Image (cartoon, rainbow, N blue to C red):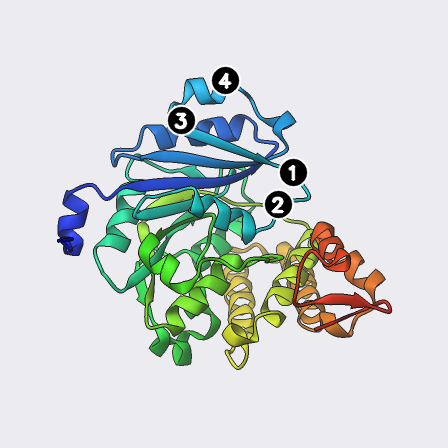
């Protein structure tokens, strides 16, 4: 007879936990990530690396870090959803922690805090970590980190949609833990995703009655200083991901959260005396919104404009070749 353990009992009995990391051209930062994961207080069973292009992989990593299990794929095979699905299929652990190669555990308690956030509540299907700015993070981006990843933890369910809007479904695979049983029940990440596979899955999960936890005690260093152009391309793909999944995002307030961030950022710049940074804030915000606006309406755009706007041309090449079902190119336009 199978014994079902309570959340606290599962934690005390060391829930089997694997870390899954998609990687492309990993370097010194990735080496530090492997080092810090190997030194976690909570035992990691395996570090499964889904590496794109074998020629960029350092063979000595497997000897240096015995927990590492690498699986190679080509650039054409990579997909934000499918690659992570494949990683999950390679694991028999109860908890799956997905990370990106540029995230760095802030301390030795990262894994333990994530496991506790998931295993401590049978209705919690996912928990994501707090992202702290790196040393080279820009002044305004540091504030954005604190806005999106505050000091207080929280638990989000479907009832929060009315007050939190789209933030209810927010979850970040920069560093997030998933209950493998619930993951299988929901059906895993989308088979094909241009971007945003974590929020799409979280939306499915919350709509099934489960919760997403924000575990502020679990911390990683992760930040970027994106240009206006990069923000445009990223937010175009974000808009596409939402348009492709109306079952999650349709009717859920989304723009309001962006407006709130702009207002808070503007207030912060005025309060701290960084008035000269206000034009940059508006250019960044305009770039984000323009990309998001076009991405949400990608079905009406000509092929050449889509390829100009996206940061993921391989995704559209797969669509055009028919390797992704559900959407297709037709006479220069994309139809669904």
Question: Is 146 rendered above or below residue 241?
Answer: above
Say whether disc 4 or disc 3 marks the residue closer to the N-terminus. Answer: 3
Q: Quadrant of residue 147?
A: bottom left
Disc 3 target residue: 35
Residue 123, horizontal then vertical, whole percent: 26, 65
Disc 3 secondary structure class: helix
Mark 2 and mark 1: Cα distance apart in space? 7 Å
Query: How packed is label 2: few (under 14 Cα within 10 Å), some, or many (20 or more)?
Result: many
Disc 2 secondary structure class: loop
Q: Are marks 2 and 1 in contact (CB under 8 Å)?
A: yes
Residue 237, horizontal then vertical, whole percent: 65, 60
Mark 4 and mark 3: Cα distance apart in space? 13 Å
Question: Relative to the observer, which residue lies in front, 54 or 138?
Answer: 54
Q: Are marks 3 and 2 in contact (CB under 8 Å)?
A: no
Question: Is 317 rendered above or below residue 200?
Answer: above
Disc 4 target residue: 60
């Amino acid at each position: 007879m199978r014994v079902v353990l309570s959340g606290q009992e599962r934690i005390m009995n060391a829930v089997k936990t694997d870390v899954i990391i998609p990687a492309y051209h990993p370097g010194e930062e990735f080496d530090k990530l492997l080092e810090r994961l190997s030194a976690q207080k909570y035992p990691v069973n395996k570090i499964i690396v889904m590496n794109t292009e074998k020629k960029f992989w350092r063979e000595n990593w497997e000897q240096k870090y015995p927990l590492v299990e690498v699986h190679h794929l080509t650039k054409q095979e990579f997909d934000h959803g499918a690659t992570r699905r494949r990683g999950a299929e390679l694991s028999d652990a109860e908890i799956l922690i997905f990370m990106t190669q540029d995230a760095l555990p802030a301390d030795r308690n990262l894994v333990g805090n994530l496991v506790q956030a998931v295993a401590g509540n049978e209705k919690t299907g996912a928990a994501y970590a707090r992202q702290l700015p790196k040393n080279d993070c820009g002044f305004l981006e540091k504030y954005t980190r604190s806005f999106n990843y505050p000091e207080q933890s929280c638990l989000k369910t479907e009832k929060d949609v009315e007050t939190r809007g789209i933030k209810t479904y927010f979850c970040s695979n920069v560093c997030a833990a998933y209950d493998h049983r619930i993951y299988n029940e929901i059906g895993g990440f989308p088979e094909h995703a241009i971007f945003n596979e974590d929020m799409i899955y979280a939306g499915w999960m919350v709509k099934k009655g489960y919760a997403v936890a924000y575990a502020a005690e679990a911390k990683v260093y992760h930040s970027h200083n994106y240009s206006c152009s990069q923000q445009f391309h990223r937010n175009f793909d974000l808009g596409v991901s939402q348009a492709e999944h109306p079952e999650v995002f349709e009717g859920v307030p989304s723009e309001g959260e962006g407006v709130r961030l702009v207002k808070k950022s503007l207030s912060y710049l005025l309060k701290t005396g960084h008035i000269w940074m206000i034009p940059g804030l508006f250019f960044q915000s305009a770039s984000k919104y323009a990309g998001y606006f076009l991405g949400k309406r990608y079905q009406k755009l000509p092929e050449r404009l889509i390829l100009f706007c996206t940061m993921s041309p391989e995704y559209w090449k797969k669509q055009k070749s028919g390797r992704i079902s559900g959407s297709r190119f037709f006479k220069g336009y994309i139809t669904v």
